[in-house]
Structures are given as C-alpha cells and as structure tokens.
Amino acid sequence: MNKDTLLFEKSRPGHRTLRLGKLDVPAADLSLLPKGSLRTKAPVLPEIGELDLIRHYVLLSKKNISIADSFYPLGSCTMKYNPVTNEAVVQYPGLADIHPEMDAGRVQGALRIMKRLEDGLAGITGLPGVTLHPAAGAQGELTALLVANAHFEATGQTKRTKVLIPDSAHGTNPASAAIAGLEAVEIKSGKDGLVDLADLESKVGDDTAVLMITNPSTLGLFESKIAKIAEIVHKAGGLIYMDGANLNAIMGISRPADFGVDMMHINLHKTFSTPHGGGGPGAGPICVTDELTPYLPSPRVVEEEDGLRLDYNAPQSIGMLRGWPGNFGVLVRAYAYLRRLGAEGVKRVAENAVLNANYIRVKLNKAYHVPYDRMCMHEFVCNNKHQREKGVHALDIAKRLIDLGYHPMTIYFPLVVSEAMMIEPTETESKSTLDAFIADMLMIAEEAQSDPDKLHAAPVTTCVGRLDEGRAVREPKLRYACYKD
Amino acid sequence: MPFIQNSESDRQEMLAAVGVRTMADLFEQIPAELRHNGPLPIDAGLSEDELRAEMTELASWNTPMAAGCFLGAGMYRHFIPTVVDSLQGRHEFVTAYTPYQPEGSQGTLTAFFEFQTMVAELMGMEIANASMYDGCSAATEAVIMASNLVRNRTKVVVSHGVHPHTRRTLETYLKWTEMEVVEAPLGADGRTELGDLADDNTCAVLVQNPNTLGVIEDLDSIAATTQAAGAISICSAYPTSLGLLRSPGEAGFDIAVGDGQCLGTAPAFGGPSFGLFACAQKHVRKMPGRIVGETVDDKGRRGFALTFQTREQHIRRAKATSNICTNNALIALRGAIYMAAAGPHGLAEVATYSLAKAQYAAKALGAIPGFELPYKDAGSFNEFVLKCPVPAARVNKAIDAVGMIGGLDLKAWYPELGENCLLLAFTETTTRAQIDQLVSALTNLAAPQPVA
C-alpha cells in the first residue's frame, strides 16, 4: 500500500465523510438570490470517506516529530510538555461553544479567566497593564511599538522614530519596527555576548523611540547590565521593550519591571505551555507600565460593579489588531497551566529550566565549542568549530540527530555566532532523557571525526531525505494540480 | 511539582555536575538587586482534579450557544464532524513546532500543501498560503501586499460593509504609514457603492461578501471597476458560503481572504481562528505568511518544504513582507480536515442548509406586523438584518426570556441604522423548532400588549 498519496490522489467521486441529516425546513430557494451570485464551478475538494480520511491524517501524523514522541531541544522555542488536561478543558461547551458578542452576563466565566490570567501575568512581570489581544509574539511586539507610537504622539514627541535592536535579536523585531513605521538601528554585541554599552550610547538620542531587548538574550545570557541599559535609554527619553520569548528562565526569579522594562510581550505558547501546533496558534499578550496602559489595544476586560465586560471604546487605545478579544482557547490553556503551577511552581519552572540547560552545557562543552561558556540561563549556544575541518556543518549535526530520534536544536540562529546550535531542554525533561541526548551528541561529535559522510547523508530514517529546497523556488509547485490539461 | 519530572536526588546530581550547590547559585548572572525575593500575587497550585473542578465551575458561568443562538457577524456555529477533533487532537500535530526541519515534519507540511490547494480551490484562485491569524489579519495583510504591488499610490478604499473589526484592524496597521483609508458607503439596498472612489491614487479596494449586513455584493462589477483604476481588488469571503456562492476568483478578484473559523472550529469566544489568503501565483513573492512547496529529496522522492522563505522575517528582517511568524497552523489543520471531510458536496450541503434555514426564518419574521427586512431585495445568504418596531435590545431580551440567545444589536457597529436593527444568523445547526420559537417570541412582542 502506498502510504504517501495525497488526499487528491485518494479522492473518488461520490465518497464523503460529512453528510447532514434531513433538512427540517423547506429546501432553499436559489431563485431568491441575485442573478450571477452563484458559483458556476464547484471547488475541486477531495471526495473521501471517513475511514480513509482518518488513515490519511494518522499516517501524516506519524511523519512528524513532536514533543509527545521525542526530545525537542529547539532553542528559543521553549518546547516544554503541553499538559493534556488543558486540551480537554478547552473543549468544555461552556468554554468552546460561546460567542464573543454574547451579553457580558452570559460569559462571566470566560471574562473571569481572562482577568485572572491578566492579573497573573502582571504579577510575574511587575507590569500592571496587560492585554491578551495579540495573536502571537510578533503581533505582541508590534502592539508594543504602536503603544509607544501613541504615547509619543500624545506627549508631542513625534521625532522619536528609531528603534534600537541588538544584533542577536529575533527577526520579528526589525520586521515589526518596519510595520510600525519606525527605523531599526542595530546595536552590536560586545565580546561577552551582551549589549555593547558604548555602541548603545553612541546610537541612543532624542530620536530614540524604543530599545527592543531580549532578556535573557538569544545567547541564553542574562543582560547583567540591564539596569544600566534601561537608565541610558530612559535618560534619553526612550522606552524599554523586552522581547519575552525567554521569560521561562526568569519567571518568579526576577521581574522585568524591576530592571526597567516599560513594555514586554509574553509567548503563551512558550513559557505558558500552550502547544505550538505545527506553527500556532499562540498568543502574545503584552504587559506595560501604568503610564502606557491607556494605549493598550481594544477590547479591554474591565471590572464594574455588576461584573466584567469587554470595553471596545477606550479613548486612547491604539485600536484592534485582529478580530475579537484574543485567542481565547490559548488563554484558557495558559490560565489552566498557571493554576496548576501556583506561585511556587512558577519559580520552580525557571530553576529547573536553567538547571537542565546548564547540565547539558557542562557535558557538551568539550566536544562542541561553546563561545560563551559560562553559567547560562534556560538555553545555550554552541557551534561546529571543532567539527568544521571535517566539513561537518551545524546542519549535518542537526540532521543526524533526527536519525537518532530527536528534533534538532535551533541552528544558524542567533546570527552573531557562526553555525550556531542553540539548545533549550526546558524544565519538563527528565535527567535520563538529558543523559541519553548528551550521549548521542557525544557520539555525533565522534562520528564527525571518524565518519563525517554519515552526517552528510543524514537523515536516512525519515520518510524523505534532505530536500531540494532550491528546486522548490525555481520550479514552484504550491498546490496540487487538480486538473489534467 | 506539576510537570517537572526530576526528583530531588536527580537535581542534586545535576547541580554537582554543573559545579554549584543550590538552585539559587544558577542565577549568579542576575544581579542580586534585580532578583525578586517576595511572593508572587498568584494562588497556590492545584492538582489536576482540583483544576478540572475549577474550570468546570468557570465554564458553568457561561451559556453555550447550543440552546439556540442567532449571533453570527463573522463567527458562526457550524456542525463539526468528530473526525476534526479526533485527528487534529493527535499529539503529533498538536505538539510539533513550525516545520523548519522538513524531514521530520512531512506530516504538517503535506497537510499544509493540501490545505493550500483546498483554499485556492475554494476561493477560485491559483495559490494560497498556509494561513494567517484570522480574517481581519488576512485582509489587513492583503492591503499591505497591495501597497507593495502597486507602488506610489496611497489610498485604500474599504467598503462600509466590511466587518468593523477588519476595518479597525486595518486602521491600526495603516495609521503609522502613508496610506489613507477611505470608506465606500452602502446604498439603500445594503450593497457597496463604489462610485468613482477607486482612482489613480488607489492601491486597493476591499469588500466583503456577504457583507456585514448579510447582503450579497455585486462582486463582478466591484472587481472590474477596481481593475479599471489599476488597483488591486481584494475580497473577503465567508468560506461556508463558497459552497454555493460565486468565488472571488470567478468574479475576477486579485486577492481573496477570509476567516476560517466556520470550517470546523467552535467560536470559542472569538478565537483562535485562522485566516485564508489566496492570490495569483505571479504575486507569490509579495505574499505574506508561510508557504509550503513540493520538491524532491536526494533520492528523487516527493517531499514538501517551506519555500520562498526569503520573504520572511527570519531572513529579511526589516524588509520582510510581513512580521508574521507563529500563525494559527493547528486551526488551519482543522480547516483542512473539515474541507476534506465535507468535500465539494458536503460543503454545498452545509451552505444550502444554512441558506434554507435563513430563508425559512426570513419569511416568517418578515411577515410579523411591524417587522421588516430592509435589504430583502439585494439578497442574502445565511444572515440578514431585521428591522424591529422596538429597540433591538428589547427584542433580544424577549428572545432571552424564552431561553435562547438573540442576534447582534447593530446599534454599536452601524449607528446610522438606529436602535431597532438586529442582525440574525442561521446555520445548518439551527433547528426549525428554534426558529419557530424565535418567531413566536417576536410575534408576542409585536402584538398589542393588554392594558393592565
């Protein structure tokens, strides 16, 4: 049996899974629709029965590497365990089968979950103004930059058009700045991997709107001079935005508000255990200071005497960035996770995440070059310096890991380390999993010397080997050809 | 501690390996004055059984739509076949990351290649991307794409019939650019009156079908007028309606977008949903979002990979077509499973059933003295405006009194319609009994009240 056919190749006329029961009202009268408003050609969707449909997707699912079957040390992505309870909870009819335009009185449970989650995030960050509206981290970043724009507009500081971004930042930072109509200015990293204060001082000024800083940085290092950095930027009248992608390392240990952060986003799909789902949905709430709270997007959850409601009309709000209040299903999962952890658990998460990362680091730092080999936070970056002369690249090491039953670490990011390999184990992995991974990484280092071709040929255990990505661009095939002409 | 598997002795061994004594020693990089030593304002943790009890309680404070609910306005309660939950719920889909390592992600990648094909088919366009956040973000990104396709034009014409959330999202995104949004009004029949608004400074025209008042637009004429002005025509379509109604591609639009919640996902208080985005292949390099392409591996076997990544933020940074990174992949997967489960005939069935229910309701409601269907002549799909003899809020209270949830009071979104207009939506899940009950509740409201 060919297990690699597409839905369209399995399609047979007359097969179908979804069949509705008998219509309990008179049949639709199409003559009441305006002339020319009907489709003339039906969409060529697959025609497939229920069992074949199930087999198709079950077979596809087996072609994925997931947290549920493999260790997934993908740096910067915080691939922690996604509690199964939360997947069940979101299906409760009282949480799934509710419409966002229902009267507030009918959705007090939904609003209470949002309010409590806001309060929890405010407590963790020390920043009191919270919006759960943004759909993902990148939208959270953009939201924060628009909040800054609105703040500077309201205070007559319209010349602040520059966003300072360290060279180790995520690509979404400069991309978001561009959409906000701001100019991205790169700040260099110093020899210690941290922000170069001299470079920062030379670029900060009365045109600075925001410094976007990832802390801990994408090198897995805490910006130990963060308070000084904040002071420099604040003195120049700018705002500090923190990319909260790496909050997992410090939550409960240090509050961003205490080191001068004015605004930050949180990836609920990283730190708060909501699943990545093959690329989303996530949620990117932002937390801001009291001063910036009036500019947060609409709608806001507001508490009044008779309960909670959504306010779509806050006068100074930057507006909406998507439909409805937020990715509610994601918010419910994050809330459930926070309730399981409690205050104590939040801190334990950070501690164990940092311990797991350092444990791997000290076991691998001889076989692999670790450019900033000191106590790391929740992740660390190594590279192929010791393997390079055998022609072994980060990509080869990553692909070999796939053959050994892992999802590889993040590779070629951050850009400030050549052939970077960024390893983030998260707190939910056990020591025995880490030990097995360490042993396999050491074996790969060995193979890189003795049998580099084995690494170049990897992966060989997957349903396909290395793909010709150049061809995908040169001869683009972006859909199945449903028609044979 | 929940979700942390290591025991205290595991931790001690690991601390020793790292060369420190206590957990606190791990945080030496954080200056002492920046550490938070006080308690967090968060309650103590719960066990799984306690959590489920709490969530059950919170859920019980909400009223599910199952009792009968006539709210739509962009988010609809359609039937969801069990296969959608069952297959989407597989851990291998739920707990995977974005498919940056194609060899280990062929499941997700293949599913998205198929998804793109189905979306393109549904929209009647050549190609589609692997989804956006939702319908509002898809429409907004389409306008931004249009401004990159047609350079040096700064005007965007948006129909007043486009969902207010989409219009507000667009406003938020464009406020800090040179682009200016101009609204095209709705005529007395509820359809967009483009007039001569599309001119040589216009880069895009955005309409929605059916529009927010439920009215079916004259798509062909809007697309033609837009193109005559040299602008990009964008249509936001309600995917369910495309089982029956003319697709944006058939009508000649350049870009088609939509919100995918209706394709197999519960309303869930507004999200997560996903956005559909389709266009002509020649525009692929300006398209936002992830795109999956077919290629071959080193042995010539068919495989799928993310492609045209040079458009994206992780490569292009400030020059990317969009800042989108994490999108709504898993909900889009639900959409793919739903479309495959429905097939062309199932989708047509859902569309015609929804239409039949709305027509049944419209006929009965329009016959109640004092109630009117102001846009009846233009034609509608599964949703229409009912003009009531009393404020819509009062009508909703009457519906509430019989244990159902009313429609959308249009006062906030379309103040020019006054206080008496209600937007009512019907799908294949609405029962005849619910509609009959709605009709009788409104009939009673219209009847002269006995003098006490």
Image (cartoon, coloured by chain):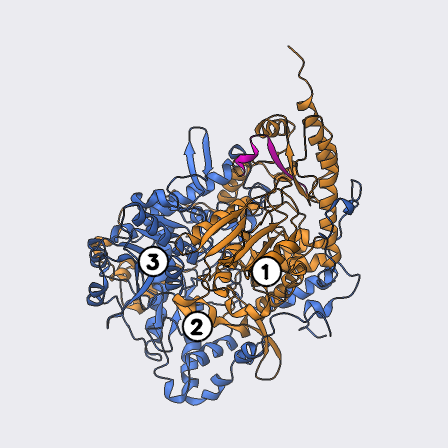
Q: Amino acid at mark 3?
A: Glu
Which residue occupies the extreme top position in the image? B452
Q: Which chain is blue?
A: A
**Residue B183 or residue A328, whichever sits in front:** B183
**Residue A403 or residue B369, whichever sits in front:** B369
Task: Give the extent of the magenta segment.
Answer: B414-426
What residue is drawn where x is 50% and y is 40%? A110
Label of residue A437 in the image: 2
Q: Amino acid at mark 1?
A: Ala
Q: Nearer the viewer, mark 3 or mark 1?
A: 1
Can the viewer see residue B426? Answer: yes
Residue ID for mark 1: B228
Q: Disc 3 versus disc 1: distance between alpha carbons? A: 63 Å
Q: x and y percent of residue B60 in the render?
A: 55, 36
- Secondary structure at badge 1 equals helix
* Chain B shade: orange
Query: Is A32 placed above or below B101 here?
Result: above
Of the numbered discs 3 and 2, the one sitting upstream in the chain is 3
Query: Is A81 placed above or below B435 here?
Result: below
**Residue B362 or residue A129, whichever sits in front:** B362
Left or right relative to A153: residue B368 = right
Callout 3 crowding tier (Cα within 10 Å): few <14, some 14–19, many ≥20:
many
Query: Quadrant location of the C terminus of chain A?
Result: bottom right
Q: x and y percent of residue A303 in the render?
A: 42, 34
Q: Amino acid at mark 2?
A: Phe
Residue ID for mark 3: A351
Callout 1 crowding tier (Cα within 10 Å): few <14, some 14–19, many ≥20:
few
- Disc 3: host chain: A
Is the same chain shared between marks 3 and 2? yes
